[in-house]
Image: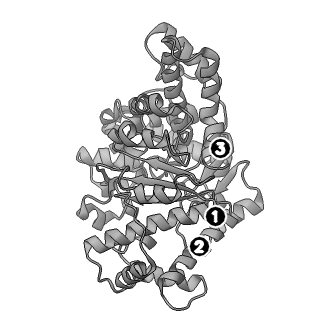
Amino acid sequence: MNPTMASRTALFPADPATRARAAELYAAVADKPIISPHGHVAPGLLADNEPFTDPAALLLSHDHYVTRLLHAGGVCLEALGVGGADFDPRSAWRLLAAHWHRFAGTASGYWLEREFEDLFGIVDELGPENADEVYDRIDAALQRTEFRPRALFDRFRIAVLATTDDPLDDLDDHARLARDGAVSGRVVPTFRPDAYLDPESLGFATRVHRLIEAAGGGRADFGSYLRALEARRAHFIARGAVSADHGVVEPYTTRLDADAAERLFQGALRGELDAGSAREFRGHMLWQMARMSVQDGLVMTIHAGVHRNHSTVTHGRFGPDSGSDIPTRVEYVRNLHALLESFGLVRDFHLVLFTIDETAFSREIAPLAGFYPSVYIGAPWWFIDAPDAIARFRAATVETAGFYRSSGFIDDTRAFLSIPARHDMARRSDAAFLARLVEEGRVRPARAQRIMQDLVDAIPREVFKL
């Protein structure tokens, strides 16, 4: 089905001249392949290539952007299948339809409408009166071969898709995909060691002992711990990994001497560290992760400033990623000083800084990226990967650091079908921002065209060493 007029002009400025300029810039990249260097799609989805079970499980239950807003409106998470709860998919879909008005103006509502139209040809607004009809139409499509995960991967023109993986993952799904040539693009793992670096995380000591055992065993001292982490990073690199990701509340870094590090490590294994000592250990391990990235070349990304599982009741009943994660303030300049003193000027070290605290973009991250050759500005993420937030992000960072110190768009999603909608949104938003700069005489038209091309290809390839 041809796109509606509204979808063709979505997110472009209202001013006719600027809108026309934005449409021209967007058209040049609309069909470019997608580079997704940070996300959470399970590699087994593509390796197994099983049909999706039903519309609710695919588009609703595992998308905490959607379920959290329904929960805020009074819908029980059990009824949506969150956390693996038994549920009736059609009833859950009817709940989504009954509460569809709550998504007006949200990024989630925009993405879902794009998915409905672009993938299933559904242009009517979802509501109680057509909930079953829309469900049946999507369900029928999911039975067809062209809606299997691998076929959609190729249809989406994904050139690179990064997953996020536990350090002890055997990465067999990645090996299967690489061996079989199952999809046209690259699917690469990402090293995510958070639970192995934070002594306050549940099961820390058990994980560390398993880590050391996987690397050959031996005495559990700080040196063997570091060697084990280095060995697992090498395993990831052998499977195609290009980055290591670190999700921290506070991006604090510090450099400790060997005796202090050993003392804290042993205290962490015994569960004896107080809050201040645990912070010192985490800070030193983030510094160690930077040291390892300098040595092995993995891009280091930091996603900071999220209070995970704010609702302990919800976390206890439904597990992590059930919607109650909340942004907090982030400070980078002082927290990263030790890391940047050691590695900020090292050639080929790449450090990408993300935030959900928008004030950090202009105050800290853009100035850091405008000086340190190692630092890049991470794209709007999670709560702020939305059209207006992207415009604010560009306004906050471009005047200080330009376009070429940014990372390119990051979709950061578990919702596989939303990947093209999210990247299309980012392209439209950037086209709108660039069009305004052109019409205001701040960027030449030819330069804007080149920037637009680079934002979707050359920039993420450079930043993530692709």
Disc 1 residue type? Asp
- Which residue is under mark 1? 296
Does residue 165 lie above or below 409 as drawn?
A: below
Residue 423 coordinates in the image, percent (x, y)? 54, 37
In which quadrant will I find the N terminus?
Answer: top right
- Please tell me which of labels 1 and 3 falls first in the chain: 1
Q: The residue tagged with tag 2: helix, strand or loop?
A: helix
Where, by quadrant of the figure, is residue 173 drawn? bottom right
Whole-number angstrom distance, CA of label 3 to CA of label 2: 24 Å
Residue 325 coordinates in the image, percent (x, y)? 32, 54
- Please tell me which of labels 3 and 2 falls first in the chain: 2
Disc 2 residue type? Glu
- Which residue is under mark 2? 230
Q: The residue tagged with tag 3: helix, strand or loop?
A: helix
Q: The residue tagged with tag 1: helix, strand or loop?
A: helix
Count of numbered tags: 3
Residue 282 coordinates in the image, percent (x, y)? 39, 68
Where, by quadrant of the figure, is residue 230 drawn? bottom right
417 with respect to 283 (left or right):
right
